[in-house]
Amino acid sequence: MSLELRDVTVDYGSKRAVDAVSINVEVGSVLALVGPSGCGKSSLLRAIAGLVPLAGGHVSWDGEDLTNTPTERRDLGFMFQDHALFTHRNVEDNVAFGLRMQGVPAGERSARVRELLALVGLDGFESRAVEGLSGGEAQRVALARALAPSPRILLLDEPLASLDRARRDELNDELSGLLRELGQTAIYVTHDQDEAFAIADEVGVMSAGELVRVGTPSAVWSDPRTEFVARFVGHETIVERDGLRFAVRDDAIQFADASQGVAASVMTCRFQGDRHRVVAKGEDGTRWSGWSLDPLVIGARVGVVLDAERLAPLE
Ligand code: ADP
Ligand code: MG
């Protein structure tokens, strides 16, 4: 079973926001859609949800065409950056919302709410006012609300973007564990590749409305195939060898003494705990960025040694 997108296209007037995207999302797996702001991630999610009309293509689940099925009958859960909780209702009422819509009886509803709150680490929060919650707690409530009706697909649009870095990493890890534990099929939209890599079974990279690369996080990282994807996943250095172009992965570079490799001078060396992020500039202007265990002196001459096995060929 899978969610199938075939040539999904979204237009806003004359502006094409999503351009013929095709992909399958297997049941129980998590797809992360990543790409810079404005590349069409949210529009694609809205198209899957039926919140925008398709200018072309099809959305189906297990062979059943959903293209003309209204949003409320697609069996979806939503979680957005702005949690959009009902602020005048307490936590229990918020989590129970979808269950009430489904006509689940009151007793069963409270049991399910209790179960969901425990799942997201908010035991005993039932009667708390939404207004008094921290950002992280509110997002947990939004997650519990989205999961309560056991939707066949959970759609998440930058759900952690409003949180600070530490909270974001923590919730990202928890969310990842939770989705796996539940076997929840999910599509997770983010502009942050670290977040995407941490949560996804498969990553889909978007650029200007198109899906330009799909693969496991490690496949996309080690073999980005295009300069756009290479830069997006953080490979900043592109080199040419024998007329072919390669993205230089971080792990392909070693900074040695100046008698070895390619001559360069250290431009920046940033302490990162157990190692240092180094950028060195070659004589031809190439910026080499990689890691060094030892701190390097700014301006020092070094030799950049490349591991040819770790250069990723570009198309
Ligand atoms: P992302 O989520 O990747 O940031 P969006 O899907 O929000 O991208 O937007 C894709 C493109 O469509 C952008 O150029 C954006 O300005 C445009 N867009 C989004 N929503 C609308 C809308 N309601 N009307 C017109 N243009 C829109
Ligand atoms: Mg968006």
Image (cartoon, helix red, strand yellow):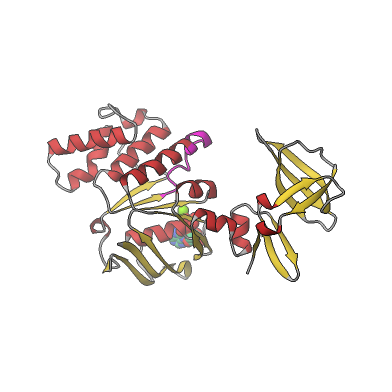
Image location of residue 249, percent across then percent down: 65, 54
> Looking at the rendering, in which quadrant would you find the C terminus?
bottom right
Q: For the point 76% across and 70% down, which residue is it?
A: 242
Splitting the image into 4 quarters, where does residue 284 fall?
bottom right
Image location of residue 77, percent across then percent down: 30, 50
Task: Mark yes or no: residue 95 visible.
Answer: yes
> Looking at the rendering, in which quadrant would you find the N terminus?
bottom left
Image location of residue 37, percent across then percent down: 53, 54
Task: Mark yes or no: residue 85 visible.
Answer: no
Splitting the image into 4 quarters, where does residue 272 fall?
top right
Q: For the point 44% across and 40% down, which residue is it?
A: 173
**Rendered view: 169 above or below 62:** above
Image location of residue 226, percent across then percent down: 61, 64
Q: Nearer the viewer, residue 130 or 166?
A: 166
Q: Nearer the viewer, residue 302 or 90?
A: 302
**Rendered view: 278 above or below 288:** above
Q: For the point 35% across and 61% down, which residue is it?
A: 48
Please give the range of residues in magenta: 157-169
Q: Is residue 185 rendered to the left or right of residue 260?
A: left
Splitting the image into 4 quarters, where does residue 85 fall?
top left
**Rendered view: 126 above or below 10:** above
Q: For the point 25% across and 29% down, which residue is it?
A: 126
Q: Is residue 294 rendered to the left or right of residue 22?
A: right
